[in-house]
Amino acid sequence: MTRNNWLMFVVAAASGSVLTYGRISHAFDRRQSAAFCAQVTGSMYMSMQATVESNSSSGSAYVVCPIIDDDLMRYWQVAQVNVHGRDDSTGAQAGVQACSSPMNFDQTQERCGAQATSGIGFVGEFTLNPDLTEWRQNVTDYPYLYVVLPPHASSLSELRGYWYFN
């Protein structure tokens, strides 16, 4: 009798594990360095620490950064994006927008959410969280971040990387 009880326990435990696996919530996150990003306009360079740094004391640098979209995490399911960097400008501000580029050949308009900014006059480390509405509304587009790095004053304005999760 003890052997039968033991066998029933093992079968019940194995069955329960298999049946409840699909109900487990999976959360994923990704951290990407600024080395993934590409310059759009402005004066900037990539440092040895894989950061993107503004190389101008008079004009902002504009950068685009890709968002990986795969079976583990679809971009429209992203709950939050944190963009990390340093703002060294007292007269301009760092900013980031969550944008998408249409997949269809007959649609060429880029779509971007509201810009999150460090604020004019802010100097120091920043973490910005852009509005993700456009990603959630345009699920067939290609996602990216559009980042503005202000000119530097005494130190550097730089983008260090970004982290996103669902």
Image (cartoon, rainbow, N blue to C red):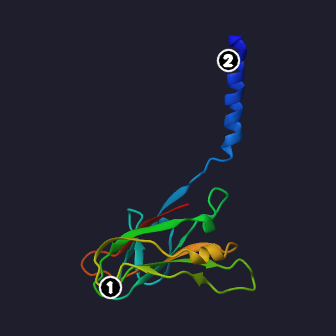
**In the rendered image, which residue does mark 2 sit on?**
6
- In the rendered structure, are the residues bearing label 1 and label 2 in contact, judged by CB atoms less than 8 Å apart? no
Position above or below: 32 against 135: above
Quadrant of the image for the C terminus?
Answer: bottom right
**In the rendered image, which residue does mark 1 sit on?**
120
In the picture, measured across the screen, residue 43 lies left or right of residue 72, that is: left
Residue at horizontal 54%, vertical 80%? 113
Q: How far across and how far down the image is residue 70, in percent?
A: 65, 60
Which mark is in front, 1 or 2?
A: 2
Position above or below: 142 against 150: above
Looking at this view, is 18 or 158 the one in front? Answer: 18
In the picture, measured across the screen, residue 43 lies left or right of residue 105, that is: left
Residue at horizontal 62%, vertical 59%? 73
> What whole-number distance in Å separates the C-alpha atoms at marks 1 and 2?
69 Å
Looking at this view, is 43 or 12 the one in front? Answer: 12
Q: How far across and how far down the image is residue 71, in percent?
A: 67, 57
Residue at horizontal 70%, vertical 28%? 12
Q: How far across and how far down the image is residue 110, in percent?
A: 62, 84
- Residue 39 numbered tag: none
Question: Could you say whether the residue bearing mark 2 is in a helix, strand or loop?
Answer: helix
Q: Residues within 10 Å of mark 2 (few under 14, many from 20)?
A: few
Amino acid type at circle 2 is Trp
Q: How far across and how far down the image is residue 119, in percent?
A: 35, 82
Question: Could you say whether the residue bearing mark 1 is in a helix, strand or loop?
Answer: loop
Amino acid type at circle 1 is Ile
Position above or below: 10 against 156: above
- Give the mark nearer the N terminus: 1 vs 2: 2
Quadrant of the image for the N terminus?
Answer: top right
Looking at this view, is 59 or 71 the one in front? Answer: 71
Looking at this view, is 127 or 133 the one in front? Answer: 133
